[in-house]
Amino acid sequence: MDGGGESLSIVDGWQETPEARSYINQLLIRNKRILFGILERPALEQLGSGSTFKKRLFLVGKSGVGKSSTVAKLCGRDISSSHDETLGIQTTTIYWPAKIASSRKVIVLELELWDSGERAMNKFDHILSACQEATDGYVFFFSYADRHSWEDLPHLIARTTGRKDSTLKMVVGTHADSVQREVTEAEIEQFQNTTKLITLPITNINSPRLADRRTPDGRAGVMEIAPFMNALTQILLVHDWNRGLLPSSLVTPSADLESPSQ
């Protein structure tokens, strides 16, 4: 369906509004992010959210490019100062509330991230197939501070997916805060125009601390990742919308909604 991108715009900055506070509070305990296990989930449905969307993404990139540190950043964990390659398959679930601009409805993204170390995938053939099975999309990684990871990106995409694979594909550029960038914005723009793959930047640095100077400030961390998570949510929604997988009611204001409140 055409026009999905505009109809499914996510309200920037909504997570900082009073309306969003009750949703964000479900992700925190004593101002620390909650790490939800397999059988755990926040009580967001009780807040009257319109819809919950569950998506699984497979993270793909060379060892040390920043996949694990990105996952840590998104779920509120500390980012390790040393690199330890992921062993086997690691799955992480993140819940993200967002507001659709056109309908003024709040939706909740239940995002399952699958990550596996490069060495493990090369050694065990079944790991790649297990990660690809039932995935809703591929996230390919490069680092702004690693020229080789950028130059290898087209080959990485080709090696992982087939030419006729219509599964969602997108790119994440890690270490976007690096002062020694080896990839230019002009190159990224050209890549996006050529491949039609959206590229999202992320900074792989720890969130501010709480008063104990050790624990990550959960609320501040949520606000830091909001631009990235809102953009990711919109990408996933538009992809499903363009394939007719979403109800039209998602972009239509309910009759009982008054003037927009953002």
Image (cartoon, rainbow, N blue to C red):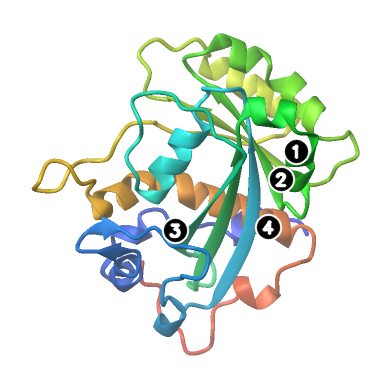
**What's the CA distance linking mark 1 and mark 2?**
5 Å
Amino acid type of the residue that numbered disc 2 sits on in the rendered structure: Cys
Residue 200, percent across and down? 53, 35
Q: Pinpoint residue 162: horizontal percent, then vertical percent.
A: 87, 35
- Cα gap from disc 4 to disc 1, whole angstroms: 32 Å
Mark positioned earlier in the residue sequence (3 or 1) = 3
Residue 57 lies left or right of residue 177; in this view the side is right
Question: Picture quarter containing residue 81?
Answer: top left
Q: Name the residue under label 4.
A: 4
Q: In this view, does 207 lie to the left or right of 227?
A: left
The answer to whether residue 125 is left or right of residue 62 is right
Which one is in front in this view, the residue at disc 3 or the one at disc 1? 1
* Mark 2 vs 4, N-terminal side: 4
Residue drawn 35% across the image and 13% down it: 179
Above or below for 250 versus 13: below
Residue 131 badge: 2
Number of numbered discs visible in the structure rendering: 4
In the picture of the structure, the residue carrying the numbered disc 3 is 11
Identify the residue position indicated by label 1 in the image: 128
Rounded to the nearest whole Å, what is the CA distance between mark 3 and mark 1?
36 Å
Are circles 2 and 4 on residues that touch, CB within 8 Å?
Answer: no
Mark 1 vs 2: CB contact within 8 A: yes
Q: Mark 1: which secondary structure?
A: helix
The location of residue 7, given as percent across then percent down, is 61, 61
Kind of residue at badge 4: Gly
Quadrant in which the N terminus is drawn: bottom right
Rendered image quadrant of residue 224: top left
**Counting residues from the N terminus, which is met first, the one under dot 4 or under dot 3?**
4
Sequence order check, earlier mark of 2 and 3: 3
Q: How far apart are marks 2 and 3 (CA)?
A: 32 Å
Categorize mark 2 by other alpha carbons within 10 Å: few (<14), some (14-19), many (20+).
many
Is label 2 in a helix, a strand or a loop?
Answer: helix
